[in-house]
Amino acid sequence: LLGRGVERFEALRDLEFERVVTRTVLVLLVLALVPALRVAGLRSPSDIGLGRVPGRWRHLALAFAGGMASMGLLFGLGLLQGAYVIAPGAMSKVLSELVLFAGGAALVALIEETLFRGGLFGAVRARTRFWTAALFSSQLFSMVHFMRPEPGISVAHAHWNSAFLLLPDVLEPVHALEHYFPFCLTLILIGLALCLLYELTGSLFAPIGLHAGWILVLRGGSLVFERVPDEMPWFFGSDAQVAKSWAAAITAGLVVLGLALWRRVRASGQREGPTRVTPARADPDPTST
C-alpha cells in the first residue's frame, strides 16, 4: 500500500509545477473560506445571502438564462461578422463535455460568489458605500484570475522553497499588460455586475446563476466555435478566448449599466413610495451611491 501511495505522488512530477502551485492556492482559498467568513462576522448561510430568500430559485434560473443569452449573443455576433466559424464535430464535443462543463461552472460560481460577493463584498459593504465595496472586491476578483506563475525558466525539480521563488512571477499580465488589459477590465466589470445583482436581489442565488451561465457559454463556445484570426481582431481579440477581447468587456459593461439603472430606479421608487421592509442584504442604504 505504501508503495502504491508513493507511485501516485510520483505522478505529480509529470505535471507543470506552476499549475500545481495555482491549484494549491485555490484549494487553500476554499479551505480558508469558512474561517474567513466567521472572522468577518458572517456565521450562517443567511448572512451571505444563501438563506431562504423569497424567489431565490426563480432568481437563479433567470440569471442563469441571462448569462447564457448575453455571452451567446456575443458568439452569435462574431459568427455573423465572420470572426468565428463552427468547429468540425462541434456537437459531439459539446455533448461529451456538457455534464463536465455544467458541473464545473456550477462549482466555480458557487465558490467564487461565496468568497468574493458573499464574504469579501458583504463584509466591506456592511461598513461603507456600495460602489466602494463593489470596486474593491471586483479589483481583487480580477487580480486573483491572473495568479498564474510564468517564470522565465520552468521549474524542473521542485524544492521546498520553489513555490516561494515563483512569487515575483505570480501575476501573469505584468509583462504584457497591453495584451491582458481588456480581460482585466472585463473581470472587473463582471465583478461589478455580480455585486449589483447581489445588492438588488438580497441573495447569492442570482449572482451564482449569472456567473455559471457566463462560464458555461464561454467554455462551451471554445469547443463549438473556431476563431478566424484576421477578422476584426481589434474587437474579438486575436485568439480563441473571447473573454480577453474588447467585445467581452463591452458586453459586461452593458450588463453593469443595465443593473445600475435598475438599482437607481428601484431606490427612487423606495424613496417616493410607501415605507416597506426590504431584505437586509438587498439594499442596506438605498440612498448611498
Image (spheres, rainbow, N blue to C red):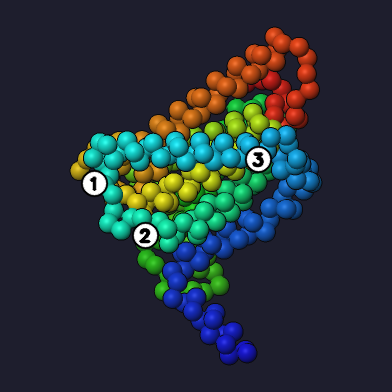
Helix, strand, or loop for circle 1?
Answer: loop
**Residue 57, labelled with which disc?**
3
Amino acid carrying label 3: it is Trp
Label disc, if present, on residue 206 of the rendered structure = none
* Image x and y of residue 31, in percent: 67, 59
Q: Would residue 180 appear left or right of 102 to someone viewing this image? A: left
Marks 2 and 3 in Cβ contact (< 8 Å): no
What residue is pinned by disc 1? 228
Q: How many labels does the image show?
A: 3
Q: Is residue 67 visible?
A: yes
Q: Quadrant of the N terminus?
A: bottom right
Disc 2: which residue = 92
Task: Kindly report which numbered mark, 1 or 2, lies closer to the viewer in this rendering.
Answer: 2
Q: Looking at the image, which residue is at 20% across and 43% down?
A: 230
In the image: residue 30, left or right of residue 231: right
Q: Between tags 3 and 1, which lies in front?
A: 3
Question: Is residue 233 visible from the viewing direction of this image?
Answer: no
**Residue lying farthest to the left in this orientation:** 230
How far from the left and from the top, in percent, is residue 52? Answer: 75, 40
213 and 149: which one is in front? 213
In x, y percent, where is residue 191? 54, 37
Residue at (64%, 13%) from the top-left corner? 268
Q: Distance between the residues labelled 1 and 2?
A: 21 Å
Q: Which of marks 3 and 1 is nearer the N terminus?
A: 3
Measure how far apart labels 3 and 1 are at the Cα level: 39 Å
Q: Badge 3, how many Cα within 10 Å: few under 14, some, many 20+?
A: some
Q: How crowded is mark 2: few (under 14 residues within 10 Å), some or many (20 or more)?
A: few
Q: Quick check: 179 left or right of 38?
A: left
